[in-house]
Amino acid sequence: MQLGMIGLGRMGAGLTRRLIRDGHTVAVHDVSPAAIDALAAEGAVAVPELAGFAETLDAPRAVWVMVPAGAITQQVITSLAAVLEPGDTIIDGGNSYYRDDIAHAAALKDQGIALVDVGTSGGVHGLERGFCLMVGGDDAVVARLAPIWRTIAPGIDAAPRTPGHAGDPAPGEEGWLHCGPTGAGHFVKMVHNGIEYGLMAAYAEGLNVLRNANVGGVERTADAETAPLAHPEFYRYDVDTAAVAEVWRRGSVIGSWLLDLTAQALHEDPNLDSFSGHVADSGEGRWTSIAAIDEGVPTPVLTTALYSRFASRDLDDYAQKTLSAMRKGFGGHEEKPTGE
Amino acid sequence: MQLGMIGLGRMGAGLTRRLIRDGHTVAVHDVSPAAIDALAAEGAVAVPELAGFAETLDAPRAVWVMVPAGAITQQVITSLAAVLEPGDTIIDGGNSYYRDDIAHAAALKDQGIALVDVGTSGGVHGLERGFCLMVGGDDAVVARLAPIWRTIAPGIDAAPRTPGHAGDPAPGEEGWLHCGPTGAGHFVKMVHNGIEYGLMAAYAEGLNVLRNANVGGVERTADAETAPLAHPEFYRYDVDTAAVAEVWRRGSVIGSWLLDLTAQALHEDPNLDSFSGHVADSGEGRWTSIAAIDEGVPTPVLTTALYSRFASRDLDDYAQKTLSAMRKGFGGHEEKPTGE
Amino acid sequence: MQLGMIGLGRMGAGLTRRLIRDGHTVAVHDVSPAAIDALAAEGAVAVPELAGFAETLDAPRAVWVMVPAGAITQQVITSLAAVLEPGDTIIDGGNSYYRDDIAHAAALKDQGIALVDVGTSGGVHGLERGFCLMVGGDDAVVARLAPIWRTIAPGIDAAPRTPGHAGDPAPGEEGWLHCGPTGAGHFVKMVHNGIEYGLMAAYAEGLNVLRNANVGGVERTADAETAPLAHPEFYRYDVDTAAVAEVWRRGSVIGSWLLDLTAQALHEDPNLDSFSGHVADSGEGRWTSIAAIDEGVPTPVLTTALYSRFASRDLDDYAQKTLSAMRKGFGGHEEKPTGE
Amino acid sequence: MQLGMIGLGRMGAGLTRRLIRDGHTVAVHDVSPAAIDALAAEGAVAVPELAGFAETLDAPRAVWVMVPAGAITQQVITSLAAVLEPGDTIIDGGNSYYRDDIAHAAALKDQGIALVDVGTSGGVHGLERGFCLMVGGDDAVVARLAPIWRTIAPGIDAAPRTPGHAGDPAPGEEGWLHCGPTGAGHFVKMVHNGIEYGLMAAYAEGLNVLRNANVGGVERTADAETAPLAHPEFYRYDVDTAAVAEVWRRGSVIGSWLLDLTAQALHEDPNLDSFSGHVADSGEGRWTSIAAIDEGVPTPVLTTALYSRFASRDLDDYAQKTLSAMRKGFGGHEEKPTGE
C-alpha cells in the first residue's frame, strides 16, 4: 500500500522503516533534506516539497503527519490539506490533544478530506517491537488503511493470546484498535499516558522506600522540631535496588515492560547520579486529569503522579514557602538551613 | 534436596509441586489430612504430625512454613521449633510483617535454629510460571538452600535478559534474590505489594476515565449545586474497555502482566457486573506506607491507592457525612437523595 | 446609591436586605412575583419585568445578577443587556466560571456595557456577617460602585486588624477587593472554594480518625486476606467528636469558622445520622484543579479533596470493580460479601 | 493551686506566666539556671534541682513536664518519678507520642504515680490567647487539676458560644477537654496537628495557584516534550496574594486563625523571599497517618499534606530520578537542564 509520511524524527523514521520492510511504498517528507535523503537511501520515495505528495501517491491518498503536537501539527495539516484532494486522508499520529482532532476534522470536512487520529505508543523501541496504535475516525477510512495499521503494529505474537479469545485475531490482538470516531484514538492514547504516569510513579516511589531502608543506621538530626525515628532497628537494610528490579522481572505480579527498562537503567547507574530528578510532563497526563474532572470520576493516583512531577520541578515553591511562613507565625519555627 | 512444607493451600501446594517435579524430596504437613494425602499421592512424603519432620528429614533440616501471616504463623513457628534441632532452618514464606521476622529470628536464635524469610510472589499462576522469591537471612543458610530457590523461581528464560548482563546469571536473573539479613525478604516483598497497589490503581482509574468518556451524551441533573459539563461535545465516546486493554498488551509502554489479567477479566465480563467494588487490602500496602512515613520519604501514589481501597469499603463514611454537615451549615445545602 | 438586583434567592435576598438597611435604593426582579413582593414589602422597588430597570434606575445603571451559574446566568445577562444602555454595568455575583466572564465582557463591550464579576462568599450567614467580595473588572467602574461593595462587605471590625496595617483601611480590610480585570473576581473566588474543599476534608478526615480510635476494641474479621490490627491496645479510645470540635474552637491552631459550624453540627447530631455522605461539588473545586494543571502547579491536597467527593458519590465504581477483578485474576481472591 | 513546671522554653514559660498571673503557685525548673531565675523574678518559685519539687510542693503534687518529646521527656519523667511520692502526678504537656504515654503510665503505676498527658496547642501566642488543652488520664486526677486547666485555657469568651449550648459551660467550651484515659490527650492533639497540616497545605496550594495566575503572559519553553498552555488568555492575572489573604479574613467561608497568620506573613513579605520552602514536620502528622492506616480509614488529604512536606525537603529525590531514567529508557527523553 502507499503512504505519505511527514516528520522523520525518531518515531516517523521508525514507522517508515517498518512499512518499507513490509513492502509498502512510503513517500517521505521532512523539514530536513538530510532526513529525507537518509530514508530515501533505505527505499523510501523522497518528497522534497509537500506539493509532491499529490503526484507521488495515487488517490485516495493517505499521509501520516508525525510532528510535534500543537501549533506545528496544525500548520502542517493546513499546508498539507492545500495540496491534497477530496477523498484523501490525513493521519495525525502525534501526541495531539483529542480536542484538536475534532477541530481539525471539522475544518478538513469542507475540503472533503478525512482526518484519522492515531495514538502511537512504543517510543524508541517501536521499530523492533512494533507500535501500539489507537485509532479514531470514520469506519470506512480506518478500514481501508488496515494494511498500514497491521504492518506498524506488533502483531498477535507479541503477547500470549488472552484466554477466551479464539479464531481470527481481532485487530486489538494484533496491536491496533479502531477506538471510535474522530478523537477517540488520541483520547485512548491520552488515558494510556495518564496510566503510564501512575505506573511509573508507583515503581519510583517503591524503589525510593527500598533505597532509604537504611535510615535506621544513618545519623539524624534530633531537635525539638524533628521527630526521631521510633524504631531505628527496623530500618537497617542496604537494599540493592538494581538487583531487586531484576528479580521482580521474573514471576512477580508487578512484572512489566516499564520494569524491564527500570532494571536496565538501575543496572547501568544504580545511584541514578546521571539524572537530576526534574521530570518533564508532555501534556497527556494533564489532559487525562482534566478529562477525569470533567467526567466527575476520581483519578487520585494519576493526578498525584502528575503533581509529583510538577513538584519535582519546584513548581510548588511558593506553596512550600507559605507553609514555612505559617509555621513561623504560629510556632516561631525557623526553617532549617538544609533539607531534613 | 530435602524440604519440609507446612501449609498446603494454593501457594504451598504450588511450591510443593514445583519442587517434586524437579526431583526434590518434600515432606508435607497441613491441618487437613486430605491436603496431605493429595500431595502424597503426587510424590510428597506425608508428615501427619509436626514431630515427624525431625525423623523424615536429614539434618540440617529446612522446613517451609506457608500459612496465614500473624498469629497462625507465629504459632506454627513456635510448635515447629520445638521439634527441630540446632542447625535446622525455618523458612517463613508467607506474607509476614518483616518486623515479626526480626522477633521470630531472635526467639529462634537461642535454640540455634535459623529463620529465613521469603517473600513469595506469583499467586495462583506460580505453579506454571514459577514464583519470584525475595529472601532474607544469614548468608550461609540462604546459600545452602540455593537449589530450593532455583527450582521454585521461574528461571532466567522467563524474561529477556537485561542488556548489560552477561556470563553466568545472577540469582536475581533466575527470579530469586537474597535481599539482606533477617526481614529483608519480607521488606522487599512488602514494597513489591505496595507498588502492586499503585499499579493496579493506575490501570483502574484510567479504565474508569475511558468508561465514562460518554458522559457528554448522558442526561445530567442541572441544578444550582451541580456544575454542568461545559463541553459535552468532548465526551461522546463509547469506549470498549476490554478491547483497549487488549490492544495495550502489544507494543505499548504500559504492557504488563497485570494488564494481561485485566484484559482477560474484561473479556469475560466487560461491565464487571460480577464484582461489587469493595476491595480488600492484605497488610503489605499498609506496611509500605508506614515504612515510607517512618523513613520520611513520600509515597503519595502508593498511599493514595491504599486509601482508595479503604474508601471503596465505605470506611470514609463519617468523614463524608461531616462534609455534608458543613455544607448544610454554611450554605444551607441539603444532600441529594442519590449519587451525582 | 441605586442598584438593580436580579435573583432573590437566599443570596440575592440577603444582599438586597444589607443594601436596603444601609440606605441604598434596590430595584428587584425575580422569576417569582412572590419573591419580588416580599422584598418590596421590606423597602425594595419592585421591577416585575426586566425592561423596568431602564426606567427605575438612573444612568449609569448597575444591575447585579444573582442566579445559577451557566446557562441561566448567560441568558439573564443577554436579556438584561437588551434593556440597558451604553455606560451601564452588569454585575455577575454568582458562581460563574471566570472564563464565562471573559466571554460575557467581550460580548457586552460592543454594546458599551461593562461587566463586573464578583465572587461572593458568606452563604446563609452573609446577611448578618456581611459577604466577602472578590471583584473583577475595569478600574473606573469598580471604583464607582465602592459604596455598594462597602455596604455588602463585613467591614473592618469583622476581624482584628492584621499587625502592620495602619491608617485608613484598604478595601481588603473591609472585606471586598478589586482583584484585577474581568474574571479576576471569579478566579479568586474559584480558588477560595478550592481551598474550602481542602479545609473541609482536613477536618473531616481528622474527625474520622478520632471516630475510629476505638477499633482496637472492636471485633474484626481475621482471615488470610485481612491484616489483623497489630496493636489493638493503642486503639481503645471512645472519643466524643462533638466535644473535641468544641475544644478546638478556643486557643488551638486550627480554629476557624468552618470548625465553628462543624462543632454546631456535631453538637446537634454527633453520629451525623441525618446525612448519607454523598457530597456534592459545585464547580469551583473542579475549575481550581484545572487551573492548577494548566498552570503546572501541584495542588495535591485540593484535588484529592475533590476526588474524595466524587468517590463519595460512587463515581469510582468501575475502577474499584477493576481492582477486584485483578485481585481475582492473580490471586484467586474472591470479594467479601460486605465492607471490611 | 500549686504546680511544678519543668522546661521553661517558649511554651513552658508561657504556661507558667498564665498560672502566676491567675494566682497559682508555680515551682519551676530548667536545665538553664538563667531560665529559672527569669521566671523566679516574675513570681515563680525556683527549684534548682529536681529533688526540690518534693519539698517545695504539698502532696499530692503535680509537676508539668514541658520538654522535647522522645528521649528527653522519658528521661525527665524517670528522674522526676524518683523524687516524687505515691499519689503525685506527672503531667506530660509536650508533643509526646500517645503510645509513649501508655508506656510511661504503666511504668509509673508501680510507684503509685499518675501520668496525665496533655496536648497543648497555642504556640507562641498562647500566653495571650490561652492554650487549648487536650487531656488524657484518670478521671479523679484530671478533675482535681481542673483549676490548672481552667487558668491555662482561653476561657469561654475566646469564641462565640455554639448555638445549642446553654447553662454552665462544659470544659470544652472553656478550651480544655478530658478526652479519655491515658494517651487520649496526645491522641487528640496528634490528630489536631494532622488536620493542621491539611489546612495549611490547602491555603498554600491555593495561594500558589493565585501566584501563578499570570502564566499566560509568561514566555514558556515550547518543545516536543512540553505541552504548550492551550489558552494563555485565561491566565493573565497578577494577583496580590497578600491582599487576597486579607480580604478572605472577613465574611468568607475560609476565615481562620491560620489565615490571619498567613495574611500577616504575606503583608510583611509578599514574595516570601525570606523562606527557602524546606518544610519540617514534627511527628504528629506522621503519627496521624499511621493511626489512619492502622484504623483502616482513609486520610488522603492529611497524608498528602505530609508527603508534600517530605518532598519539599527533596526526600523524593531517588524516586524522581527513577522517573527520568524510565523516560530516557522508553522515549529517549533527556532531562532538561532546568525546571520547567
Image (tube, coloured by chain):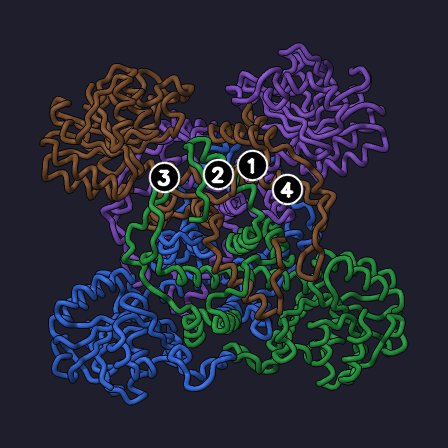
Chain colours: A green, B blue, C purple, D brown
Depth-wise, is mark 2 or mark 4 nearer the camera?
2
Is the residue C275 above or below the residue B137 in the image? above
User: Picture coordinates of residue B76 (x, y %)?
Assistant: 18, 68
The reply to whether residue C1 is in sight is yes
The earlier-in-sequence mark between 1 and 4 is: 4
CA–CA distance between discs 3 and 1?
Answer: 28 Å
CA–CA distance between discs 1 and 2?
Answer: 9 Å
Q: Which residue is mark 4?
A: D212
| Camera-nearest residue between D13 and A89 | D13
**How many residues crowd around disc 2 within 10 Å: few (fewer than 14), some, or many (20 or more)?**
many
What mark, if any, has residue A324 been given in the picture?
A: 2
The reply to whether residue B264 is in sight is no
Q: Amino acid at mark 2?
A: Ser
Q: Which residue is mark 1?
A: D272
Q: Chain of mark 1?
A: D
**Tags 3 and 1 in contact by the CB under 8 Å rule?**
no
What mark, if any, has residue D191 been given in the picture?
A: 3
**Tags 1 and 2 in contact by the CB under 8 Å rule?**
yes
User: Picture coordinates of residue C313 (x, y %)?
Assistant: 50, 46
| A40 on left or right of D127 | right
Q: Chain of mark 4?
A: D
